[in-house]
Structure formats: structure tokens, C-alpha cells
Image (tube, helix red, strand yellow):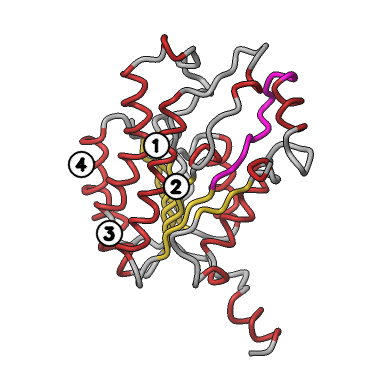
Amino acid sequence: MKTNQIIQNYFDKNYFKKKKILITGASGVLGSKLAEVFLELGSDLILIDKKIKKSSNKNIRSLSVDFTKTEKLERILIKEKKIFKKIDFIINNAAYTGTNLNWIKPLNFQTYKDWRFAHKVNLDSIFIISKVLSKEIIKSRGKILNIGSIFSDLVPNFFNYKGTKMNSPAAYSISKNLLLQLTKWQASYFSPYVNVNMISPGGISRNQNKKFQKKYINSTPLQRMCKEEDIIFVVLFLLSNLSNYITGQNIIIDGGYSIL
């Protein structure tokens, strides 16, 4: 196949037009930017988060769901799928993180409640979404993308957190590691109809403590933290036809942090 045919057949700027895309954690920084990008590409969006504003845009359906309430999530999805009827792509972006939560504590103060909530949001919700929407995603021969973390494969370097109020709770790392195994299981189960992959970003620049940033950057070959666009470019690749022969993989986006 000639180069111009490859570009014409696979790198189509209208590829995402009218595609039905479900994005969880859609109110967060990354989730909202993903929604913005796909809306500009002409996609129809189903946006889910614990708190999300209703949109007047006819191409957006917003659902407020607390992912720690797994049974309620399943009931809502069963009801809603009768309305949106089809699904092309699922981006599992919602996560129980330390951003606005009071669980960044030494191990002896970390609670079982937070442990369970982290697993419910970071793992159980993804199982439920793929379970409820399995027939729809198979019918459309769609794609599933799970958002992980470098801690899906690594353990935190706790030296980076010294002298700051930051930390990395056990539940976050462990739940992301389990998500990697779930991704591989999903890829095997849904084959050959649905591609399932995972991306694992490194530390995303979010105005963190300067001491932490300096230590983290000094440990990163590309000498900077991750940006949202670094992640979005890989998301576009994995949901496009350019990645049709990739499934069950975990693409690490960390500027080389994990190779040292």
C-alpha cells in the first residue's frame, strides 16, 4: 500500500465524527480536555463523573454517578444504554486519587475505607462498565482504553515525597496494578472484536510542591513532567485505525522515568 493510501484510509480527520464515546472522570482536568478534543472532532459524548454539569449541547449527555456506589452505577448504565443504544469507544479515566482527598497519610493512618473506595473507582467501575456495555461495544467493534499510572508497574519512590505533604497511598498503586491485569483479561475476552489497551502516564504537572517537582524531573530523562497533551496524543492514536493491531498493551507515557 502506498503512503498516500495509508494516510487516506487510516489517518482520516473525520474518523471520530459521530462516534459515540463514553468518558468517565469527565469533570477532571484530563477528562474535560479529552471531552473538548473529541467534541471538536465531531464525536457524540457520554460524560460521567461524580459531579458534572448538564450541557445544552445536543451532542453531550452528562451523567452524575458516584463510582463508589457500584450497584447504583450498574443500574444507571443499564437504564441509560437504552437511550444511547450504541457505543464506539470507552475511556475509563475516573480515578480515586489524592488530589482533593484527605487520604494522603503515612501507612499506619491509611484507612480500609479509602482502600475499598480506591478499588471501587479505579477497578470495580471499569469491570461494571465493560460488563454492562459488552454487547454494545462488540456490536460496534469498538475500542476500550483504560487510564492507568506508572504505578501499575512500579512502586513509588518515597524519597520524592520527603519534605512535602505529598504521598502515594498503597491503595492507589495496587488498584492500578490490578487494572493492568484486568486490561489484559478484557483484551483476551473481547478479541477479535474489540481492542482493549491501557496507558500509564507518569507524574502530570499540576502545580505540585516545588521540591517534589525538582526531584521528579531530575529522575526523568526528558527532564520535565507529563502534560495533558502528551496523554491526549496517545489516546487519539489508540482509538484510531492506526492502532488496529494493538491490544492488551500498556503504553507508558513517562518521559523515560521508568527506565532508570
Mark nearer the viewer, 4 or 1: 1
Label 1: how many residues lie within 10 Å, few (<14), some (14-19) or many (20+)? Answer: many
Residue annotated with mark 4:
75
Q: x, y percentage for residue 129?
A: 31, 48
Label pair 2/1, CB-CB below 8 angstroms: no
Mark 4 → mark 2, Cα distance in angstroms: 18 Å
Q: Which amino acid does label 2 sit on?
A: Ile
Quadrant for the C terminus in the image: top right
Was residue 238 drawn as part of the magenta stretch in this picture? no
Q: Up-down: is 65 above or below 222?
A: above
Q: State the mark number for residue 134.
A: 3
User: First in sequence: mark 4 or mark 3?
Assistant: 4
Residue annotated with mark 2:
23
At 76% across and 42% down in the image, what residue appears?
221
Secondary structure under tag 3 reads helix
Magenta stretch mostly in which secondary structure? loop
Quadrant for the N terminus in the image: bottom right
Q: What residue type is labelled 4?
A: Arg
Of residues 163 and 231, the one drawn nearer to the viewer in this rendering: 163
Q: What stretch is highlighted in magenta?
A: 200-211
Q: Up-down: is 141 above or below 225?
A: below
User: First in sequence: mark 2 or mark 1?
Assistant: 2
